Structure formats: C-alpha cells, structure tokens
Amino acid sequence: MTNHVVIQASHSVIEQMRLHYENNIITKVPQGGIFVAKLPSCTITAYKSGKVLFQGIDGNKEAARWGQSTPPSQKSTKPKANATKFSPPANISTMSIIGSDEVGTGDYFGPITVVAAYVEKTQIPLLKELGVRDSKDLNDTQITAIAKQLIPFLPYSLLVLPNEKYNDLQASGMNQGELKAKLHNQAITNVRKKIAPAQPEATLIDQFVKPEIYYTYLRKQKTVQREQVYFATKGEQIHLAVAAASIIARYAFVKHMNDLGKKAGFVIPKGAGGNVDKAAARLITERGKDSLNQFVKLHFANTEKAMRIAGK
Ligand code: MG
C-alpha cells in the first residue's frame, strides 16, 4: 500500500531532515521545494512553506521520525505532550547555565565551529544590553562586534574542526551528527573545567539530533556530560547562553571564511547553493581538484556539481 503523509515542520526540523537524508537527496526539486530525497521505499519532498510530503510504502514510518501531521498553531495550545527528561525546565531562562551551539554544518565551504559558553543569571541583563539575541537576526558586522565584547569576560570554549580533518573523519565513516556530538560534549567539558569549582545549574544544547542518539554517539567517550543536560531546538531563543555561544561560533566561522578567502584569492560564499558550486569550480580550475580538501566538506553534493562546471 502506498502512503501519502504530509507533516508541517519548522525550518530547523527541515534542516535536520536535509542532513539526515543528505545521501539520498536528488538534484531535481519542484517549485517551492527545498529538497527531495529518494529512499528505496519513500520519497520525501520538503517545501519552503514548511510542508513535508512523504510518499511510498514507508511514508508513515519515515514521517513518524519527525512528528505528527499537526499544524504548528495547534501544537502551541496543547501542553507539551512530547516533553521528555531531556526537555529544559520551564524556568531555565532565569538560571545560570552553559549553552552550546554550532555553526558551519550546512555550509559547503569552511569549518564546523562549536562553542559552549557559561552565562550566570546575573549577567543576563548585561548580555541583553550588549545585543545578544538569536544570531539569525544579526548580520556578520553585528555578530563580530558583539562577539568581541563577550569574549573578554564570558567563560567559553571554541572548537574548530578544519576541513581537512572533517573530510578525514567523514571518510572514515563518522557522520556529521557524531562529529557534532563529540564537539559539543568536549566544549561543555572544557567550560565546566574553566568555571570550577562553580557549577552550572543546567546545560542547554541547541538540539541537532534526538538526545538518545546524541548519547549513543558518545558511548565510547571517556567523559560524557549528562547532569542537568537539556536539549531544545531554537535553544538561542530559550536562554541567552545558547545565543551567546551561537554568536561566538558564528564569529569564528566568519573569521575562518575570511581566511579561506585570502587563501583562495576571492570571496568564499556561505551556504550550499549555486554560487558555492561556481566558487568551488573556480578553485578546481585554478588549483586542481585536490585543493578542495582544505576548503570544503567534500561529501556534499556540491563537489560533483563543481566538477561538472569545471568540466572535470
Ligand atoms: Mg544550532
């Protein structure tokens, strides 16, 4: 039996889907679409409207990974039926916490940067004063200015995974989720050491994968932070510690992109769209295919497109 299931998803969930189905994404996208992924028994089409269509015998099963077919407007009026032990407590925004977030995972060029930052509750008004908020509402100039003000006083840990290292790990079979989980865990561990003997009241990770999966990725790690560790999508809207972490991570990412631009001799574009393919094609033409390893995340579909453009 063929199933057609439509769910309504937030942009961050659609982004998670895009990463989840990364290896099955096909290049043909319908009008208004974000991506199409073809699995053996299900085709997934995500639209800019937030609608995601699952077609095929596994339609129901695949859709169930991402929630029910409930419009988001109805969701907010109901109590959080899907709250788990990993959901942040209601009063978390007033606590002293470590927040963590990452940047660069969806960008073809540039490293992944992960930051954990500790914000004491007494610092929350100051952070607001400095303009800390959701970094998606801020441009690079604002992000740089705010980050430079945060860095001198905020206890934080910045981890940068350069492209060569990323490509090595990816080629060895590690997926992006596992990479991110390890980096988040390490950054949080670093910050806990920095602020000791003080301890955070909680830790909030900007969720990129289900918490259960996050911990399976960490099962071989020596130190795993679990105590009062919570997960939430759009974490930067829940506590300014996540917003601050996100701002510092983006600042570092922008800096590395500028450095890559200097190396390349031209401005390196963000994201994973058509302009990115062209920039990569230019590198291939000017420096050869092997040069890509230090600039891009090789497993992205952009590599093939760039090769085609470069006529290789
Ligand atoms: Mg995030």
Image: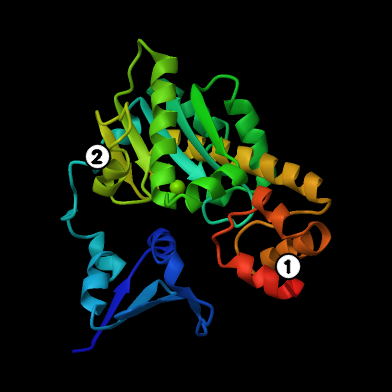
Label 2 crowd bin: few (<14), some (14–19), many (20+), radius 10 Å: few
The residue positioned 45% from the left and 16% from the top of the image is 194
- Residue type for callout 1: Lys
**Residue 71 locus on image (x, y percent):** 28, 71
The residue positioned 23% from the left and 88% from the top of the image is 2
Quickly name the residue at label 1.
278
Whether residue 21 is visible, yes or no, is yes
Q: Is residue 129 left or right of residue 197?
A: right
Quickly name the residue at label 2.
90
Calculate the distance from the C-alpha at mark 1 to the C-alpha at mark 2.
Answer: 46 Å
Q: Residue furthest bottom?
A: 1
- N-term-proximal mark, 1 vs 2: 2
**Residue 20 locus on image (x, y percent):** 39, 62
Quarter of the image where the N terminus is located: bottom left
Q: Is residue 273 left or right of residue 229?
A: right
* Relative vertical location of residue 206 with respect to residue 191 in this rendering, above or below: below
Report which quarter residue 82 is drawn in.
bottom left
Quarter of the image where the C terminus is located: bottom right
Q: Is residue 78 left or right of residue 310?
A: left
**Residue 254 locus on image (x, y percent):** 66, 44
The residue positioned 30% from the left and 73% from the top of the image is 7
Q: Nearer the viewer, residue 243 or 117?
A: 117
**Residue 211 locus on image (x, y percent):** 27, 46
Label 1 crowd bin: few (<14), some (14–19), many (20+), radius 10 Å: some
Q: Please tell me how many numbered marks the rendered image carries.
A: 2
Badge 2 element? loop
The residue positioned 33% from the left and 22% from the top of the image is 200
Query: Is ligand 1 less than 8 Å from the beta carbon at label 1?
Result: no
- Residue type for callout 2: Ala
Q: Is residue 29 left or right of residue 120?
A: right
Badge 1 element? helix
